[in-house]
Amino acid sequence: MIVVGLVLTGIAAAIHVFIFYLESLAWTSERARGVFGTTAPQAEATKEMAFNQGFYNLFLALSVFLGIALYAAGHVAVGATLVFVGAGSMAAAALVLLLSSPDKRGAALKQGVIPALGVLALALGLAL
C-alpha cells in the first residue's frame, strides 16, 4: 500500500506541476484559457493572481516530490510527513473548490481524487 500511496501522490504532484505551467507560464494562452474557461480579457485581468496560484501548486508538488525522495532514502517519518502535507493540501484545496464552486466539480475532482487516494493508501500502508 505504501508504494501505491507514493505512486498516486507522485502522479498528483505531476498534475500540479502541469497546473503550475498553465497558471504561471501559459495563463493567457489559448490552451490555458480553454482549460479554465476564460476569455482573453479575463485572463489578462487575472494574470497576476494566476501567476501566484500557479506557484502555490508548484510548491505543493515539490513538497510531495521531496517527501517521496526522502522516504525512498530511508527518512520515513520526514518523507511521509511531507507527502501527507503536500498531497493532503491538494485534496483539501480541491474540496474547498468543490464546496465553494459546485460548477467546477470536474476540476475539483481532477485535482483532488488522486492525492486523496494517495494519502489514504499511504496512511493504510504505514498503519499496517
Image (spheres, rainbow, N blue to C red):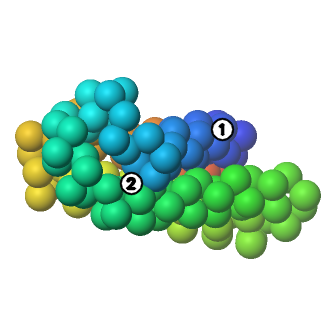
Q: Give how far across and how far down residue 105 sits, in percent.
A: 18, 39
The residue sitting at 49% across, 47% down in the picture is 25
Identify which residue, 72 or 103, lies in the foreground. Answer: 103
Identify the image quadrant of residue 92.
Answer: bottom left
**Is 70 on the left or on the right of 85, as rendered?**
right
Q: Is residue 58 left or right of residue 94?
A: right
Q: Nearer the viewer, residue 24 or 103?
A: 24
* Residue type at the position of mark 1: Val
What's under tag 2, amino acid-wise? Answer: Ala
Do we see residue 58 in this rendering?
yes
Q: Residue furthest right?
A: 73
Residue labelled with disc 2? 91
- For numbered disc 2, what is the local secondary structure? helix
In this rendering, is residue 78 above or below 37? below
Mark 1 element type:
helix
For label 1, the crowd category at 10 Å Cα-Cα, with few meaning under 14, some 14 to 19 and many 20 or more, is some
**In the rendered image, which quarter is residue 1 located in?**
top right
**Which residue matches tag 1?**
7
Residue drawn where x is 37% and y is 44% of the image: 27
User: Which one is earlier in the sequence, the residue at label 2 or at label 1?
Assistant: 1
- Residue 26: name its quadrant: top left
Q: Is residue 79 left or right of residue 64?
A: right
* Residue under the image location 57 percent in, 63 percent down: 59
**Could you tell me residue 8's position as x and y percent?**
58, 38
